[in-house]
Amino acid sequence: MSGALASDLRNLLGEDAVLTEPGDLVRYEEGWRYGKGKALLMVRPATATQVAATLAACLAAGVQVVPQGANTGLVGASTPDASGRMAVLSLERLNKRLEIDPVNRTARVDGGVLLSALNEALAGHGLMFPIDLGADPSIGGMIATNTGGTRLLKYGDVRHNLLGIEVALADGTVLDAMNLLRKNNTGLDVKQLFVGTSGIFGVVTGAVVQVVPVPGQRATALVGCASGEAALALLRALERDLADVFTAFEVISAAALTPVFVHHEGVRNPYGTAHPPVYTALVELASTLPVAALDLAALLEERLGTLLETDVAEAITDVFMGRPDDFWAIRHHVSESLRGEGRVLAFDISVPRSRMAAFTEAARALLAAEYPFVRCCDFGHWGDGGTHLNLVWTEADAPIPAVNLVPELQSRIYDLAVTNFEGSYSAEHGVGPHNQRFYEAYTPSLVRAVNGALKAHLDPQGILGTTRL
Ligand SMILES: Cc1cc2nc3c(=O)[nH]c(=O)nc-3n(C[C@H](O)[C@H](O)[C@H](O)COP(=O)(O)OP(=O)(O)OC[C@H]3O[C@@H](n4cnc5c(N)ncnc54)[C@H](O)[C@@H]3O)c2cc1C
């Protein structure tokens, strides 16, 4: 089957657009965190028309297709399964179109354009795409996963910044909804069908995104908090006083923070030899105003100083003002530092912000009572109700093998988040094979029915993606 399809695709797209040698396929077969399989072939069309033709050929051959952008997704949805029968459709060559309209404050891009390339082009106009994260994904992949990132508090997620879309559908047609308008109330907003749905309704070949002016100044502080409730009180006070310029509120537990300084000697520990408090909040302000008009660092220092004289004071243990790059380096090193501590089970949970502290405490209590060998190293985007409640243990200490412990912990923690705290088992990474069984467990049956009807309409033979919504 591989031979006939590969030769059809080579005729359509050219010799070098199709890879079939096992050695060439390896890098498209393994995901960043989850997902490792075997591909039938990898095909990399360079235009929307070529993507559509690829899908038509795969449909005719009855071959399932996995769209792949930059392969930075974290739920195993961008790689093939182990069958060796799926084609990987890489968007890596669909990256030529990058048109900026500085007056409209929009960018019209191909689906395979990388976030870094978009921002590089925008920088010349003093603009940026405001979704910010520690990876360099493609715009199509960001749409398919509805990426959140560290500044969602200020700018929203991809969904909030997407104006138009172009999608190749499973039958080989191209849906053109490359809307440039911020206001266009003319019925169904069709682009939203393709946001956060893991590429199972169509392959994003183009997009129009709205962009924002690059702030000329940023100011950051690390604030020690004696408890989760203290962190929430700080968040509330900062929003009340500084909402216009408040861009990020990340929270790191002591258990997640300490390993950063153990595994990265170059990253400075503001607490020195003292033990960090229960939580450390990274607070960021940003503005396009010049420092002469508004000195953000001074403003932040003054506001935090004032808070130290109010009822929040008892809950705040430390305040450190510092350079944004230094403080963000601490935040961005957390995840990888934990890997140096032992076995890590990562979570991407959201709960209503007001319940974040209570949820985390309940999770800790559950772990202490039933899994005392597990460390709760939680950190994340508390400003938008997100937490990576990562659990760490060493195999030697665990009385249960990881193969049994992992699904057990997932069920216990997700049940707590979804059932008791009205939360989500996937705040920003999507469903994918990694979360498939939780989608089935927690999604209301009518919502699943709507998803199923859309899938049956857009992709009746089910050739697109590995996620089943
Ligand atoms: C270090 C690191 C930090 C991260 N931080 C964050 C964070 O803070 N917030 C956050 O939300 N995410 C975060 N992520 C997750 C990840 O970066 C996003 O999910 C990313 O946006 C996916 O884009 P991609 O191009 O890599 O897509 P891929 O990984 O290639 O694919 C992801 C999904 O999208 C589908 N897909 C890809 N391209 C297309 C397309 N053109 N059309 C249709 N479907 C497509 C794939 O089939 C798959 O289902 C992080 C990842 C890493 C590695």
Image (cartoon, rainbow, N blue to C red):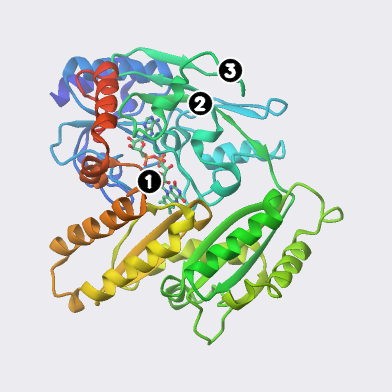
Q: Is residue 202 left or right of residue 102?
A: left
Instruction: State the image coordinates of residue 220 (x, y, percent, origin top left).
Output: 66, 63
Name the image quarter holding residue 407: bottom left
Q: Residue furthest right?
A: 292
Name the image quarter holding residue 248: bottom right
Residue 19 in sight here: no
Q: Secondary structure at mark 2?
A: strand
The label number, if any, that marks residue 429 in the structure image: 1
Classify 189 as above or below 68: above
Q: Which residue is mark 3?
A: 184
Instruction: State the image coordinates of residue 250 (x, y, percent, origin top left).
Output: 53, 60
User: Quick one: quadrant of the N terminus?
Assistant: top left
The Cα–Cα distance between marks 1 and 2, rounded to whole angstroms, is 20 Å
The residue lying at 28 percent from left, 54 percent from top is 414
Q: Is residue 296 left or right of residue 165?
A: right
Disc 3 crowd, CA 10 A, few/some/many (<14, 14-19, 20+)? few
The residue lying at 56 percent from left, 84 percent from top is 272
Sequence order check, earlier mark of 1 and 2 = 2
The answer to whether the beta carbon of the residue marked 1 is less than 8 Å from any atom of ligand 1 is yes
Q: Amino acid at mark 1?
A: His
Q: Which residue is mark 2?
A: 207
The residue mark sitting in front, 1 or 3, is 3
